[in-house]
Image (cartoon, rainbow, N blue to C red):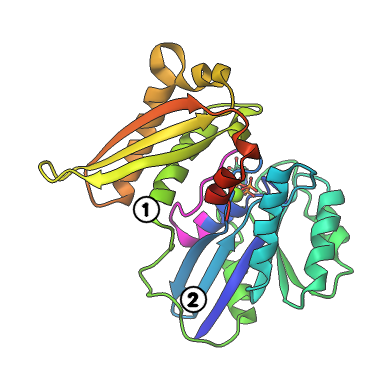
Amino acid sequence: MKCAIVSIIGRPSAGKSTLLNTICKEKVSITAPSPQTTRNAIRGIFTEDRGQLIFIDTPGYHLSDKSFNQRLVEVAQASLSESDIILYVVDTTRPPGAEEEKILSILRTINVPIIVAANKTDMKESSVSDVEEFLSYDPSIKGILPLSAASRDGVTELLTLLFKTAPEGEQLYPEEFYTDQPPEFRAAEIIREKVVNRVSQELPHALYVDIADMEIDEKTGKLWIRAFIIVERESQVGIVVGKKGSGIQAIRKEAQKELKHLFPYDIHLDVRVKSQAKWKKKSNILNKLIY
Ligand SMILES: Nc1nc2c(ncn2[C@@H]2O[C@H](COP(=O)(O)OP(=O)(O)OP(=O)(O)O)[C@@H](O)[C@H]2O)c(=O)[nH]1
Ligand SMILES: [Mg+2]
């Protein structure tokens, strides 16, 4: 049997979380068109006859002097130290730039095989040859695989190379496990996904979701989840809530539907929006959110 811990690394929006979900065939990690959606190291586990691959999805690697972004980069870097393989996801629709150089320079310092997923080949702007040219001189790269995380094209070939590269070992998780995220975290992430996919510009980065309470009502057997969407400014509350509450109602409905699929209970979801100025500068909140 093969067993490997595989860190998924790459720029924001390269498609790391989408690829993880496609491999695991489950929504393990939330996705959005806006960058910096993933804020934690998220495990997705894929088990089959060949063995077990434990993927760690990480926040997109973004050069910035803001402390919030630096924390995200630290999460990504920390995952490298425990990995057997690095799965470096590159967006083939964007020319490789300074961030890709920086990522490569970090990856080169650790002695772990690198497999490159040249993603988004389904898009007409995709240029795999640009990525191949940029990476070809690097001996630590074991393969550059063109693929589309969205359509699954090329994912079988990626799994073949991952298992070939993986060391021998017993599986670390029971085979029915596809993630190890605590229920509150998953609930918060699903709600956050519904919000970030409805808002634009700076708002996806301005919010977090706090689960105030999650308990089973003894009488009805329903799982009650009470959550707060927290934004940075009062003016953003109205944007999330929407006209006559249409925004928040849609968020509640979409999140509740997905949570029902996730937990074996009928769910009652209560979501409110409030503002908390400068939460990104408060280390107690950041410590709770990013770890
Ligand atoms: N067309 C196309 N879109 C893709 C593909 N993979 C990802 N996307 C889209 O790219 C956007 C970003 O995808 P994510 O999976 O959230 O990217 P990420 O690398 O996890 O981003 P961060 O967590 O912000 O670092 C989403 O809108 C996805 O639907 C792909 O193969 N083809
Ligand atoms: Mg992500």
Mark 1 C-beta to ligand 2 under 8 Å: no
Task: Say if the magenta span includes residue 206.
Answer: no
For the residue marked with disc 2, what is the amino acid?
Gln
SS label for mark 1? helix
Farthest residue to the top: give it. 244
Quadrant location of the C terminus in the rendered image: bottom right
Mark drawn on residue 52: 2
Mark 2 / mark 1, whichever is N-terminal: 2
Residue at position x 56%, y 26% in the image: 199
Residue 146 in view in this figure: no
User: Can you give x and y, in whole percent of width and height, for residue 87 in the image?
Assistant: 67, 65
User: Can you give x and y, in whole percent of width and height, for residue 270 in the image?
Assistant: 32, 32
Pointers 2 and 1 in contact (CB under 8 A)?
A: no
Residue 1 in view in this figure: yes
Task: Say if the magenta span includes residue 27.
Answer: yes
Helix, strand or loop for the magenta stretch, by majority: loop
| Extent of the magenta region | 21-32
Please state the total of marks drawn on the protein image.
Answer: 2
Q: Nearer the viewer, mark 2 or mark 1?
A: 1
Residue closer to the observer: 139 or 28: 28
For the residue marked with disc 1, what is the amino acid?
Pro
Q: Which residue is mark 1?
A: 183
SS label for mark 2? strand
Q: Quadrant of residue 66?
A: top right
User: Can you give x and y, in whole percent of width and height, for residue 86 in the image?
Assistant: 68, 69
Q: Quadrant of residue 68?
A: top right
Question: From the viewer's perspective, is residue 248 above or below residue 92?
Answer: above
Alpha-carbon span between mark 2 and mark 1:
23 Å
Residue at position x 45%, y 12% in the image: 243
User: Can you give x and y, in whole percent of width and height, for residue 208 in the image?
Assistant: 52, 37
Residue at position x 61%, y 45% in the image: 283
